[in-house]
Amino acid sequence: MFEGASIFVLVLLVLVVITIFQGIRIVPQGFNYTVERFGRYTKTLQPGLGIIVPFIERIGSKMNMMERVMEVPSQEVITRDNAMVQVDGVAFFQVLDAAKGTYEVNELENAILNITMTNIRTVMGSMDLDSLLSQRDEINHAILGVVDQASTPWGVKMTRIEIKDINPPRDLVDSMARQMKAERDKRAAILEAEGKRQSAILEAEGEKQSAVLEAEGRKEAAFRDAEARERAAEAEANATTAVSQAIAGGSAQAINYFVANNYVKALEALAQSPNQKVLMLPLEASSVIGSIAGISEIAREAFGNDSGGGATPKPAPRKRGTTTVPPVS
């Protein structure tokens, strides 16, 4: 009896220890455990020490709550302009609710992968090839919004979806290279033509300004010449007026001075001519002497050299003849 009781107690103690260990669960950091009672979800165990009812409750699933990365395999996508491209990518997601991620969808990762690939084809198929290659950020944002909305009932948050490679066919790449070269040649020709046009405009503007400045210079010179001629004419008019007044006052020597002065200036101009070597004067040399005598007479009258105050003696009559002036060397 005693040995049978000892064995019973020992077995009971072993069962108690096993039961205790069955009711204790240690949840590691980054994971959540779902608890099922008779197959029905009851609660979620957070990281740390958890207690469940042995033989009645059990662990349903061990859900990874950390952010995970998933490769999106390459697939063919037909764009709106009927171009075939190979596309692959990568998706980042995190489970926020372990119960929903366990019981709302079967095979969570496979579901996320399939919905991501489907929406990649949908979004990229609605775009032209040029937009597909140049608007990578817009594509990522559009796909992320659609997939995140679709996976929200599963307790999943899609953090990022990135398109890694977009590979058009080789012949299409060659066509795009030729198109890009033609476009750049076009822009170069336009820029060259624009440069020539700008150069021609600037050159014409410079010629215009030069012509304007030249015209203003001619205008100023003409104005100065007219002013000089006006002053010369005014001086000549004053001289003529003075001579006229002297003649009107009874002095005939003033007209002699006027004629003699012009006569001497004419001879000076003839003598200074570079093409004139011989001067033929069909006038008497006595005419010049008479003019000089007239000038002397005017000077005597002006300065009062005539002491008697009587009539001025008349100059000797000039004889007409021909005088030959020797050649000017």
Image: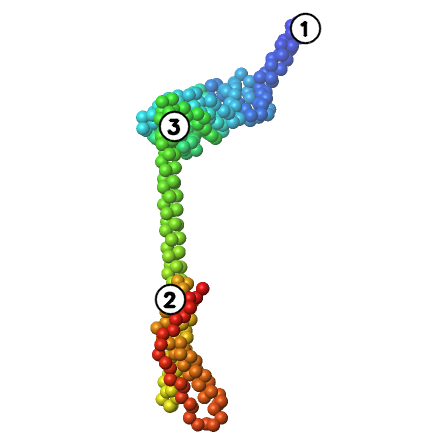
Q: Residue at x 42, y 68 (%)?
A: 326
Task: Name, please, the residue furthest toward the right.
Answer: 2
Q: Which residue is mark 2?
A: 222
Mark 1 or mark 2, which has the lower sequence index? 1
Task: Sort mark 2 into few (<14), some (14-19) or many (20+) by Cα contacts within 10 Å.
Answer: few
CB under 8 Å between discs 1 and 2: no
How far apart marks 1 and 2 lie (CA) works out to 151 Å
Instruction: Please state which amino acid type lies under the numbered disc 1.
Output: Phe
**Which residue is identified by label 3?**
177
Looking at marks 3 and 1 on the same chain, the residue that comes earlier in the sequence is marked by 1
Task: Indicate the amino acid at tag 3.
Answer: Ala
Taking the spot 37% from the left edge, 34% from the top edge, the residue there is 185
| Label number found at residue 35 | none
Given this view, does label 3 or label 2 mark the residue nearer the observer? 2
Question: Which residue is the site of mark 1?
Answer: 2
* Residue 99 x/y as whole percent: 48, 25
Q: CA distance from mark 3 to mark 1?
A: 97 Å
Quadrant of residue 316 in the image?
bottom left
How packed mark 1 is, by other alpha carbons closer than 10 Å (few <14, some 14-19, many 20 or more), is few
Decide which of 40, 163 is in the foreground and name it.
Answer: 163
Q: Nearer the viewer, residue 1 or 285?
A: 285
Residue 254 appears at what percent x and percent y? 40, 84
Q: Secondary structure under badge 2? A: helix
Is the residue 82 above or below the residue 11 in the image? below
- Pointers 3 and 2 in contact (C-beta within 8 Å): no
Answer yes or no: is residue 165 visible: yes
The mark closer to the camera, 1 or 2, is 2
Relative horizontal placement of residue 15, taking residue 267 as reference (left or right): right
- Residue 230 appearing in the image: no
Q: Please tell me which residue is depicted at 40% across the width and 53% down the height of the picture.
A: 206
C-alpha span from label 3 to label 2: 67 Å
